């Protein structure tokens, strides 16, 4: 990845501008700049990819952008719509991870490690849902389905990385971490208590999600991490 190319510079510039808008302007003003990060990310992928264009990835970006726009307008007004869009996004990302990984034997020890890592994540999400339940009670089924796919995606990212520590799985794990943090922050920010810093953090995580998603899609699957990386 040559980050000095105009396409990358455009992506970094739009990502930086979206952060500036989140810090100094009203949340609704993000509608004018937030989509640009997805547009420039798509251009980076289309111009820099070495393999055949993966339409699923572009669809996932479109779903993420659509849900992001609705979130900016107001999550509370569009919980069902956002939940459906985000669920489809996670389904596609699960498929992308599956396609990038070959079948390998898995040990009981690995499953145990996966469980021990995932339990705190599950607990945090459970507490957040309890916190915002009164706001989503009438549309809880939609939110619950989204949460299930969200947790499945995080589990899958952990599973594939623990099973095969290559670069692409590391990038997807980092992507999952950013999305996991962003989902918690957005839920609290939109459905419990609004804070500008939460919006800034969510935009920051969104930009990182796009960046590491690009690295995941353009990474050579044969690049393996050293044994020092845990």
Image (tube, grey):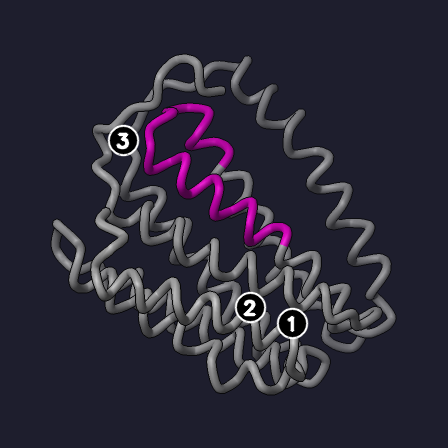
**Could you say whether the residue bearing mark 2 is in a helix, strand or loop?**
helix
**Magenta region, mostly helix, strand or loop?**
helix
Q: Please determine whether, in this image, residue 9 is positioned above or below residue 67.
A: above
Vertical side of 162 occupied by 200: above or below: below
Q: Secondary structure at mark 1?
A: helix
> Which dot, 3 or 1, sits closer to the camera?
1
N-terminal label among 3 and 2: 2
For residue 229, what is the image quadrant?
top left
Pinpoint residue 196: horizontal percent, then vertical percent: 73, 71
Alpha-carbon neighbours of circle 2 within 10 Å: few (<14), some, or many (≥20)?
Answer: many
Cα gap from disc 3 to disc 1, whole angstroms: 43 Å
The residue shown at (46%, 69%) is 64
Along the horizontal axis of the image, is 112 left or right of 86? right
Residue carrying label 2: 19
Q: Is residue 215 above or below residue 90?
A: above
What's drawn in magenta, residue-wise?
158-181
Number of residues whose C-alpha sits closer than 10 Å to that of mark 1, classed few (under 14), some (14–19) or many (20 or more) = some
Q: Label 1, on which residue?
A: 23
Q: Please report the residue visible at 48 percent of the width from the left and 31 percent of the height from the top.
A: 159
Q: Is 162 colored magenta in this rendering?
A: yes
Given residues 198 and 98, the one toward you in this image is 198
Q: Nearer the viewer, residue 160 or 41?
A: 41
How packed mark 3 is, by other alpha carbons closer than 10 Å (few <14, some 14-19, many 20 or more), is few
Q: Which residue position is annotated with label 3? A: 102
């Amino acid at each position: 990845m040559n980050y000095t190319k105009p396409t990358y510079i455009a992506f970094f510039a739009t990502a930086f501008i979206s952060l500036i808008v989140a810090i100094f302007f009203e949340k609704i003003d993000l509608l004018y700049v937030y989509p640009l990060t997805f547009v420039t990310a798509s251009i980076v992928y289309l111009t820099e990819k070495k393999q055949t264009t993966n339409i699923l990835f572009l669809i996932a970006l479109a779903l993420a952008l659509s849900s992001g726009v609705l979130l900016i307008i107001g999550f509370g007004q569009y919980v069902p719509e956002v939940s459906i869009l985000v669920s489809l996004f996670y389904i596609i990302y699960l498929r992308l991870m599956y396609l990038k990984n070959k079948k390998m034997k898995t040990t009981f020890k690995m499953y145990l490690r996966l469980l021990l890592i995932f339990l705190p994540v599950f607990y945090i999400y459970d507490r957040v849902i309890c916190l915002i339940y009164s706001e989503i009670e009438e549309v809880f089924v939609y939110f619950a389905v989204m949460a299930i796919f969200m947790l499945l995606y995080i589990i899958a990212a952990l599973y594939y990385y623990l099973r095969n520590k290559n670069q692409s799985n590391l990038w997807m794990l980092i992507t999952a971490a950013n999305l996991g943090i962003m989902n918690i922050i957005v839920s609290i920010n939109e459905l419990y208590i609004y804070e500008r810093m939460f919006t800034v953090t969510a935009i920051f995580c969104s930009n990182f999600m796009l960046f590491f998603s690009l690295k995941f899609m353009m990474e050579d699957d044969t690049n393996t991490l050293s044994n020092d990386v845990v």
